[in-house]
Image (spheres, grey):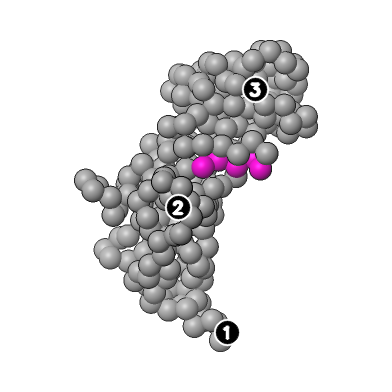
Amino acid sequence: MKQVMNVNGAVLHSEREYDIAKSTAVTIGQVVKLEEGLVVPAAAGETGAILGYAAESHTGTADALNGRNDGVKILVQDAPDAIAVSPAPRVTASGGSATTVKVDSMPSFAADVFNGGYLKAAATGKVRRITDSAVASGVLTLTVEAGDAAAEGDEFILFPPVGFSAGNLDTAGCKLVLTATAALPLRVVGRDEKGNNIYTMAAKHQLAVGQ
């Protein structure tokens, strides 16, 4: 993830150095938190407060060309009101109709959690609003505006609705994926239909009042 602005529209970013163990591996853009005063990657199903997004990589191994790779400091974009951009999740249809898209092997998201979001057909670029959503026996059914019938194998970009905060972080800790239903400390605050991205901000932040 990469900070692009603050809630007020400001594009000047807060970046500060924090302590990190020499051997800890963090990639640029990874969601991080503080643990016993040290920066560590957020867990895939993180539910606790985050610190922000790594503004540089820290491999944890020595590099003659970059002494910070295994140094004891790392730059973090740490503003509690930071808005970050990342790729929107993608799903592959197992079938559907002109008004539904079905996706197999989905975790049990709460009913209606995707209502108000949007689906974009990867092949045609057509965007349709999601009006209903439910999971039964591992099959997610999304009700959408009428259009082309969904066929098995069709790929869609899923833009979750504003306020959505479920899912997991991917293995790199840099984007939202729909492989679990954890109550992530991030919430969706917007979408970029042309770039196939979503905008998120912290729902729980370690520097925010009350956290």
Residue 5 lies within the magenta run: no
Question: How far apart are the two marked residues, 3 and 1, measured between alpha carbons?
Answer: 49 Å
Left or right of 192 on screen, residue 1:
left
Q: Nearer the viewer, mark 3 or mark 1?
A: 3
Q: Amino acid at mark 2?
A: Ala
Q: Nearer the viewer, residue 1 or 178?
A: 1
**SS under mark 3:** strand
What residue does disc 3 label? 128
Q: Nearer the viewer, mark 2 or mark 1?
A: 2
| Most common SS among magenta residues | strand
At 72% from the left edge and 16% from the top edge, which residue is drawn? 147
Residue 187 position in % (x across, y down): 43, 38
At 42% from the left edge and 35% from the top edge, which residue is drawn? 165
Residue 42 position in % (x across, y down): 41, 53
Q: Amino acid at mark 3?
A: Arg
Above or below 25: residue 146 = above
Left or right of 8 on screen, residue 120:
right
Q: Nearer the viewer, residue 57 or 11?
A: 11
Number of numbered discs on residues: 3
Q: Earlier in the sequence, mark 3 or mark 1?
A: 1
Extent of the magenta region = 195-199
What residue does disc 1 label? 65
User: Which disc is residue 10 wearing?
Assistant: 2
Residue 108 position in % (x across, y down): 47, 26
Q: Nearer the viewer, mark 2 or mark 3?
A: 2
Question: How far apart are the two marked residues, 2 and 1, measured between alpha carbons?
Answer: 34 Å
